[in-house]
Image (cartoon, rainbow, N blue to C red):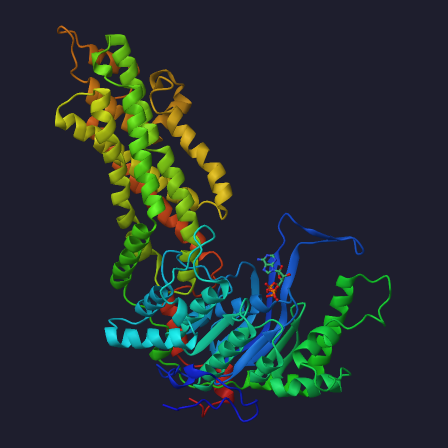
Amino acid sequence: MEDTISISQDVPDLELGSYQTEYSPSLVEANPAEITFENLVYSIQLGNNKKINFRKGKTISEKVIIDNITGSLRPGRLTAIMGPSGSGKTSLLNLLSGRNITGKVSGNIWLNGRPCEDGALSLVSRFISQDDVMLPTMTVSEIIEMAIRFRVEGIGEEELESRKKHAINTLELEKCQNTRIGDSMDKGVSGGERKRTAIAMEMATNSSVLFLDEPTSGLDIYTSLLVIKLLKKIAQSGQTVITVIHQPSSDIFNLFDDVVLLSQGKTVYFGPQDQIVPYFSKIGYKCPNYTNPADFMFTDVLNESGKDISPRTSKLEFQKELSQRLSEEWNKSELANSLRSRVQNPNTSVINESSFIDTINSFSQFKLLSQRAFKNMARNKLMVRIRVAQSIIIGLIFGIVFYDSRNKSLEVKIQNFMGALFFSCISQFLPVAVNVLSTFSTELHVVQRELQSEYYSLFPYFSAKVLVEIPLQIIGPIIFTSISYYMIGFRSEFRYFAIHACGLILLSLNAFALGIFTSTLFKSITVALSFLPMLVVIPMIFGGFIVNTGSMLGWIGWLQWTSPIKYAFTMLTTNQLSGFTIDGEPVGDEKLESLSLGRFKIVGCALFLLLLFIIMIVASYFGLLRITSNGKLRTKTTSTKKKKSILLGNPDERFIKNHSNKF
Ligand SMILES: Nc1ncnc2c1ncn2[C@@H]1O[C@H](COP(=O)(O)OP(=O)(O)OP(=O)(O)O)[C@@H](O)[C@H]1O
């Protein structure tokens, strides 16, 4: 291994710091990958927020975000995508990597000449997004370790430790490696440390292509330089590295091999970094000596003072005209011609299996995710304590309010029993659904990000989540029943107690599934929380206590059979009243009949509760699938197997003619 890193002949000799002797990004030999694309257009429908162009009197229903971009991103080179805010940098990165796409896409993308405009690039690339959400209960070291374990099947402890150490040292995370990520309520690592952890997660494993969306935002100048130098080193190891960057310092700017400059979704420059100043000088924008070229581009080129623009022109129109003019200049240039010719003659070297991002098998994913979920739950003490405290406090309140109802007069006893049974059901339904909804919605952001990065797939995650949460949904009703049951004075034999607890456990599981399902219906937790009462009120009304379900109109009465509260209430009531006699009078059965709870008894109701739970869990899974696959490119070839076979196959016909000797 080298002792020092020589960045490049033509960049300043910058000190890399101590990490350079320890870190080698070439953990796995990268397959050279050239990404070429032609006439890429990405537009979105404006939906209800249609924009009216008053001057022309037309309604614009479509916004063009990426406007006809052609280019090539080469292996062994570090490419920066730059441009003013809103110019389409992130959209271009997403489009190329096949992530977060919600609009219409046209044009072609190739990897070594193989078509991959259907998001196939995600199979060979890692993506470090701006959004660095992570599980707040995990430490920096655990997060990096988890990322490696998800990527490398059966990794040995020694290799794991060495990769983790490399990543931690490289991103200078030693000081905070045992600190939890934290969140707004429970402060953990700083913003910059969190960002570096997100980068370290992806850097601990290798691939042919690395996309980064503003990896230096929130970092100080020193750390930003450190990160870009690391990217340079990774590029030099043969990978194709593409990063979106905002206002780089001149030291950082000089480290880039290629620069893509965008304005209003159009290409203004796409070529070698060292040609950008001569190019703009040639078209009339001379960069003064000792000025950071990046600053010059932003202030003098992309925002030139509008001296030759009519005063009546709005800023937006001025920007549009300027972008149009600069992009026309670009299209006429020699550099653009050579870029187009490169796109027509790409590197067509063979792509092999080792280029694909590794993920461990589904069973290993499930095991890892279960361990993580257990750890997360154990550390999320507040939520566990709230759930246990809720059961204790509500159990005590019920016990006190309905205390010793067994020894009251018959009317009072029946009235108290009914009230206690119904509200026991409510107490194990409503709070559970709300708790699950609020905690799961927060976790969902992390899961979405990890699914997008393809650490694991949804099924192992979901199975692990359900498996780990079930014990908590069982403990709550058991605590509640243990406290309240005998205080209220329900039937004393153990089997009645057990049936009572079982009914509440099944109901609590239904509430858990409803909470997850509701969180998959909406993107915003606020909207989901506002919608939840409706999903809870209906089962309550049809629960068999508030309204006599036998007296309901037929066309609406069927709703009672969708209410888990109804089944649990019927189960609990039948358990207490069935066969209950006073002086040989079947008082209990008469009361049961008058309630018109239907023909299902204890076992039938338990089975229906189980069935509703399964239906709701399956619905939650598909709900999750819907929201987590939102934004992935969905076009003609959707299956991963098919995408892989295209990448492993021959290049596009048009390149075979040009490159008959290249593969
Ligand atoms: N799904 C979408 N719906 C509506 N507008 C969108 C959508 N995606 C992108 N845009 C718009 O497209 C433009 C480009 O967005 P993009 O995020 O790519 O810009 P950017 O150059 O990365 O900006 P920044 O530097 O501020 O992150 C913006 O005007 C943005 O509002």
**Residue 652 shows in the view:** no
Q: Looking at the image, can residue 121 be seen?
A: yes
Expressed as whole percent of the image width and height from the top left, the position of residue 566 reads 32, 26
Count of numbered labels shown in the rendering: 0
Displayed quadrant of residue 574: top left
Q: Position of residue 447 (x, y in %)?
A: 40, 56
Q: Is residue 76 left or right of residue 541?
A: right
Ligand number 1: quarter of image = bottom right
Q: Position of residue 84 (x, y in %)?
A: 66, 69
Left or right: where 514 falls relative to 492: right
Split into 4 quadrants, where in the image is the C terminus? Answer: bottom left
User: Looking at the image, which is closer to me, 63 or 527?
Assistant: 527
Left or right relative to 6: residue 384: left
Which quadrant is home to the N terminus? Answer: bottom left
* Residue 105 rendering spot, x and y as whole percentages: 56, 65
Residue at 25% of width from left, 63% of height from top? 364
Q: Residue at x 70, y 88 (%)?
A: 278
**Residue 512 in the image: above or below residue 195:** above
Q: Nearer the viewer, residue 149 or 69?
A: 149
Say which of 288 and 452 sits in front.
288
Residue drawn at point x = 25 percent, y = 44 percent: 471
Quarter residue 197 falls in = bottom left
